[in-house]
Image (spheres, rainbow, N blue to C red):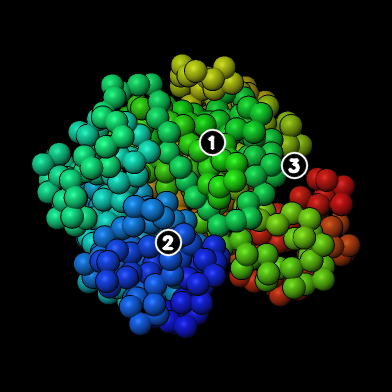
Amino acid sequence: MKLDLDTCYDALKARDARFDGRFFVAVRSTGIYCRPVCPARTPNKANVDFFVHAAAAERGGFRPCLRCRPELAPGLAPMDAPDRIARLAAARIEAGALDDSTAEQLAASLNLSGRQLRRVVEESFGVTPVELAQTRRLLLAKQLLTDTRLPMAVVAQAAGFGSVRRFNHLFTTRYGMAPSRLRQRGGDEALGESFQLRLSYRAPLAWPHLLGFLTGRGAAGVEAADSNRYLRTVALGAHQGWLAVEPIKALEALQVTLSTSLLPVLPQVLARLRRTLDLDANAPVIDAHLGADPRLAALVQITPGLRVPGAFDGFELALRAILGQQVTVKAATTLFGRFARAFGTAITTPHIALTHLAPRAEVIAQASLQQLIDLGLTTRRAETISRMAQAVASGAISLEPGPDPEAVMAAMQALPGIGPWTAHYIAMRALRHPDAWPDGDLGLLHALQLKSHRELRAAAEPWRPWRSYAALHLWNAAASGG
């Protein structure tokens, strides 16, 4: 991806937060690369290079700034990369896809050959998939060293390194310092029950609305709000735990507290959490696009930075969506709570509101229809849930963000009881499709005072490629009586 040098330098001079994470600036005289919001003195234009990704700057021989900390920069938004495949590959690498599998396996999951994957990633980011993974490991380790007192061996393992020796060698070679230098203010501490990290975002962020949407449609025991904090239980493979998230005052960042039981899958947890909270959205760009339409201008002005809540687990979201068909939000929440108690696993946490892990597709796929009906479902609804669980458990349908959300939506609609509204809603949240549009939604019709779904589809055309965000604004207005 090519960068306009004049635009980048103007953004650097202004310390424009809208560009944070969209490029990095490297200063040749110091050998250091920074975020465009770095508070250091602005370098001369003739003495800088701009890179689209931190890995490209490190490939050029630059090391990360200790002041602005490039590891805290927001990630790429859904439409930032010109190639959707490259963006998806980068997101999966960020989640640790190359820590326990090969680039060939990652390529196959994206319907590519290894050579094609390397080409699209290099064209977009200027580095290979392996270089992206290595920079991700180093920067995550740097964040853990700076923000926590976790033992060095634990940091190395959590960041995805096979050994402390390998970690020390790469860190020292790449950054010109020993990892221990970042621990000058204190040494390692014993491993406790939890630890804390920061996650950055591009402001604005409508946190109260995001928190209310997630927990208002959550399930007792799995997800909850505690004052201004978002709480939930987590299960990834054999690893179970919990997390809590809350805003940090005066910073464009969230404080995340995680149970140490999640350290072995930390990259996956952080990537899923960023998706759940839509932290990589380029809010100023989306707000400007939607706010240019008089029908949405007032809504965007009232609630800038409104995000599309994602899903920590695709099947969990699909189950909630199906349970919510033709019933109230409160009724759907009650039903999901029953499913969590019946098919989820009990877990002990320090938060009284968190008691169960969400039910897995594999478990519900093996349940009888009568077991599902006994939880308060109709026979048809039970059949829909069973078929969805079987499709996800078998791999016939993947509810993780992928290269072709339209194909996944078509596959979902081939199941009994899954119509366009449910498919688009799942695509919006689980598949992270920014342009999903559930035009069968009566609330959207009423909000725009239209009479037909054809009129609704036509009305939404100017909002592409951000129709998912337009839907959230209209739903938010309806919920608040606007």
Q: Residue sitting at 31 percent across and 51 percent down?
A: 139
Q: Residue sitting at 82 percent across and 50 percent down?
A: 478
Quote the CA–CA distance across marks 3 and 2. Answer: 55 Å
**SS state under label 2:** loop
User: Disc 1 marks which amino acid?
Assistant: Val
Q: Earlier in the sequence, mark 3 or mark 2?
A: 2
Which is more toward the observer, 107 or 127?
127
**Which tag is nearer the camera, tag 3 or tag 2?**
2
**SS state under label 1:** strand
329 vs 295, left or right, is left
Residue 342 image offset from top left, x and y in percent? 54, 21
**Which tag is nearer the camera, tag 1 or tag 2?**
2
396 vs 252, left or right, is left
User: Disc 3 marks which amino acid?
Assistant: Gln
* Residue identifier under label 2: 40
Q: Earlier in the sequence, mark 1 or mark 2?
A: 2
User: Disc 2 marks which amino acid?
Assistant: Ala
Regarding residue 391, the answer to whether it shows in the image is no
Q: Which mark is residue 245?
A: 1
Q: Is mark 3 in CB contact (under 8 Å) with mark 2?
A: no
Residue sticking out furthest to the front: 41
Q: Quadrant of the N terminus?
A: bottom left
Q: Earlier in the sequence, mark 1 or mark 3?
A: 1
Q: In the displayed structure, would residue 15 be above or below residue 270? A: below
Q: For label 3, count other residues whose C-alpha is less than 10 Å away and answer few (under 14), some (14-19) or many (20+).
A: few
Q: Residue sitting at 26 percent across and 28 percent down?
A: 188
Residue 306 image offset from top left, x and y in percent? 67, 54
**SS state under label 3:** loop
Quote the CA–CA distance across marks 1 and 2. Answer: 29 Å
Q: In the displayed structure, would residue 238 be above or below residue 55? A: above
Which is more toward the observer, 346 or 388?
346
* Residue identifier under label 3: 326
